[in-house]
Amino acid sequence: MGTSVFYLVAFLSIFFSLMVIFAKNPVHSVLYLIVTFFTFTVHYILLNAQFLAVVNFIVYMGAIMVLFLFVLMLLNLNKDNEPLKSGLVKVVGIVAGCCLVVTLIGSLKATAVSNPLVLQNVNLGLVKNLGKELFGPFMLPFELSSILLLTAMVGAVLLTKKEKV
């Protein structure tokens, strides 16, 4: 039962992520990305990582992706507004796509079929254990990243602030 659910959700994740790439309409692309993030939430639940599932659901699906959707809808993207792409950009895109295909082929050759992980520790992925790790051995990097994010937020406010003339 568990492995069939995993394979179904994995297939849906791959399918909707490909739909994000191949959708012609940017609004549809964002909607497919929201569905893709929902499948990631299901993966986190299957891995017994409830905290990551809730954070992914609230932060990514609920806030960031809806914000992207509103921004795209407000931009009113039309074919008239779309800039012409030069030949160099198309060549770089083709080279990047080929590099991606080579990387995917290499990673698929490196993987082996194995049995799904059976969790021996039922407390794995709980918020209490995550807090112990974050505020234990990873206290300094955690605090430095919070200072970095605070600095970036203050910098963004100062950059967008209009000077009085």
Image (spheres, grey):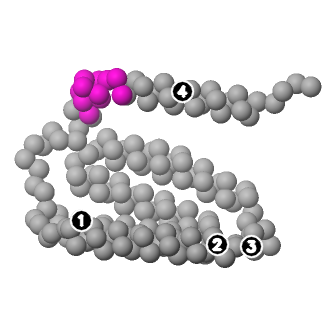
Q: Main secondary structure of the magenta part?
A: helix
Q: Residue at x 55, y 67 (%)?
A: 29
Q: Which residues, given as a range, are shown in magenta?
A: 130-141
Q: CA distance from mark 4 to mark 1?
A: 38 Å
Left or right of 105 on screen, residue 152: right
SS under mark 1 = helix
Q: Marks 2 and 4, Cα distance to the nearest angstrom?
A: 38 Å
Q: Residue at x 51, y 31 (%)?
A: 149
How far across and how far down the image is residue 11, in percent? Answer: 32, 72
| Above-or-below relation of 34 to 144 | below
Q: Give the mark nearer the N terminus: 1 vs 3.
A: 1
Q: Amino acid at mark 4?
A: Leu
Question: Disc 2 designates what residue?
Answer: 88
Asked if labels 2 and 3 touch by Cβ distance under 8 angstroms, the answer is no
Q: Classify residue 78 by image quadrant.
A: bottom right
Where does the image place residue 116, in percent across and percent down from the top left?
Answer: 13, 62
Q: Which residue does the numbered mark 4 point to in the structure image?
A: 150
Give whichever of 37, 149 is nearer the camera: 149
Q: Which residue is mark 1?
A: 6
126, 107: nearer the viewer: 107
Q: Residue furthest left?
A: 120
Occupied quadrant, residue 86 = bottom right
